[in-house]
């Protein structure tokens, strides 16, 4: 039986744990990975999702403007599936689901539709755009037809 014999593998404390310095280095490396990897991974998908919702916002605003300028009702349709004959005021993006709430509307219709009237008013409601990880809401006022995006 040898006491006090040191080996490189066992370390100074007889191999019964990690030193404080080793733990601090591991925690620092994990912290760096947590800070660097997720933003790089999620940044591109978030940017694409925001672009898609912004394009829906522009489609809605254009339809309202056309309804007022041309003095006739105008609809924007958000179908659940891509259609062969996409309408002019139709918006679809793969991987993004659109739901509408407010003004006694069906929660899961075949396609979501917003109607704008010649006086600038609309059918109104809140449009929820949902992907796997992200959600954004566009609010449409029924009386004024005003279209705003809800900020987090």
Image (spheres, rainbow, N blue to C red):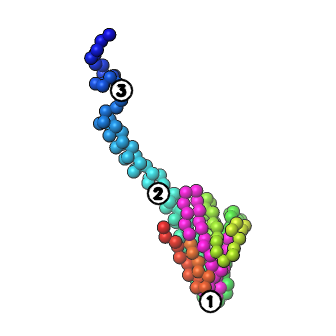
Find the magenta span and give its range: 111-137
Q: Which residue is mark 2?
A: 43
Q: Please tell me in which quadrant of the rendered image residue 24 appears.
A: top left
Q: Which of the two labelled residues, at mark 2 and mark 3, occupies the earlier sequence position? A: 3
Q: Position of residue 45 (x, y in %)?
A: 51, 57
Question: Who's the residue at 50% across and 60% down the image?
Answer: 46
Judged left or right of residue 38, residue 145 is right
Q: Which residue is mark 1?
A: 119
What's the mark number on residue 102?
none
Tag 2, which secondary structure? helix
Image quadrant containing the N terminus: top left
Q: CA distance from mark 2 to mark 3?
A: 42 Å
Q: Position of residue 53 (x, y in %)?
A: 55, 68
**Is disc 2 surrounded by few (<14), some (14 to 19) or many (20+) residues within 10 Å?**
few
Question: Who's the residue at 38% across and 46% down the image?
Answer: 31
Any part of residue 117 in sight: yes
Vertical position of residue 96 compared to residue 63: above or below: above
* Front: mark 2 or 3: 3
Tag 3, which secondary structure? loop
Q: Please tell me in which quadrant of the rendered image residue 15 appears.
A: top left
Q: Which residue is mark 3?
A: 16
Q: Are marks 2 and 1 in contact (CB under 8 Å)?
A: no
């Amino acid at each position: 039986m040898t006491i006090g014999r040191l080996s490189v593998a066992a370390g100074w404390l007889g191999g019964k744990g990690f030193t404080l310095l080793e733990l601090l280095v591991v925690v620092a490396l994990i912290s760096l990975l947590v800070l660097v990897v997720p933003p790089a991974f999620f940044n591109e998908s978030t940017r694409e999702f925001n672009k898609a919702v912004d394009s829906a916002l522009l489609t809605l605003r254009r339809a309202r403007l056309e309804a007022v300028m041309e003095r006739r009702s105008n609809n924007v349709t958000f179908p659940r599936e891509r259609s062969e004959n996409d309408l002019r005021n139709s918006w679809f993006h793969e991987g993004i689901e659109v739901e509408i709430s407010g003004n006694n509307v069906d929660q899961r219709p075949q396609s979501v539709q917003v109607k704008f009237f010649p006086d600038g008013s609309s059918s109104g409601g809140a449009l929820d755009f949902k992907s796997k990880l992200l959600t954004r809401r566009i609010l449409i006022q029924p009386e004024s037809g005003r279209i705003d995006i809800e900020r987090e």
